[in-house]
Image: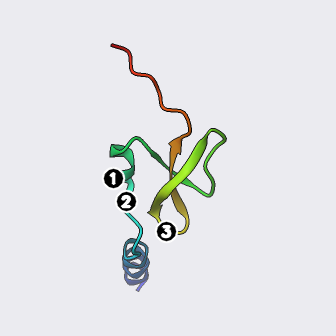
Amino acid sequence: MGILWFILIFISLTGHGKTHGPDSCNHEGGLCRVGNCIPGEYLARYCFEPIILCCKSLSPTAEKS
């Protein structure tokens, strides 16, 4: 019975309209964080709405040539 509840919760979390998952967040240069973004980051979207956020840096990092 416990596994059934786990599966239902997982399906509920992945079924939200604006969620993209951690792979999509990481691919676009963001990090998934629980609760709040740290100072210097902004909320780009949700990894798993509404608890896990996809946070991106406010200032773009300069890439070395």
Above or below for 28 versus 5 = above
Residue closest to the eye, 64 or 19:
64
Quadrant of the frame with the N terminus: bottom left
- The image's mark for residue 24 is 1
Q: CA distance from mark 3 to mark 1?
A: 14 Å
Farthest residue, direction bottom? 1
**Mark 3 secondary-structure assignment:** loop
Question: Which callout, 3 or 1, points at the residue further toward the start of the chain?
Answer: 1
- The image's mark for residue 34 is none
Q: Position of residue 2 (x, y in %)?
A: 43, 81
Residue type, label 1: Ser
Q: Position of residue 8 (x, y in %)?
A: 39, 82
Horizontal relation, residue 42 to residue 20: left or right: right
- The image's mark for residue 49 is 3
Farthest residue, direction right? 39
Above or below for 23 versus 18 = above
Q: Look at 43% across and 73% down and name the residue there.
A: 13
Q: CA distance from mark 3 to mark 2?
A: 9 Å
Q: Look at 38% across and 45% down and name the residue there.
A: 26
- The image's mark for residue 21 is 2
Does the CB distance between marks 1 and 2 fall below 8 Å?
A: yes
Residue type, label 3: Glu
Q: CA distance from mark 1 to mark 2?
A: 6 Å
Q: How many marks?
A: 3
Q: Look at 33% across and 44% down and name the residue there.
A: 27
Label 2: how many residues lie within 10 Å, few (<14), some (14-19) or many (20+)?
some
Residue type, label 2: Gly
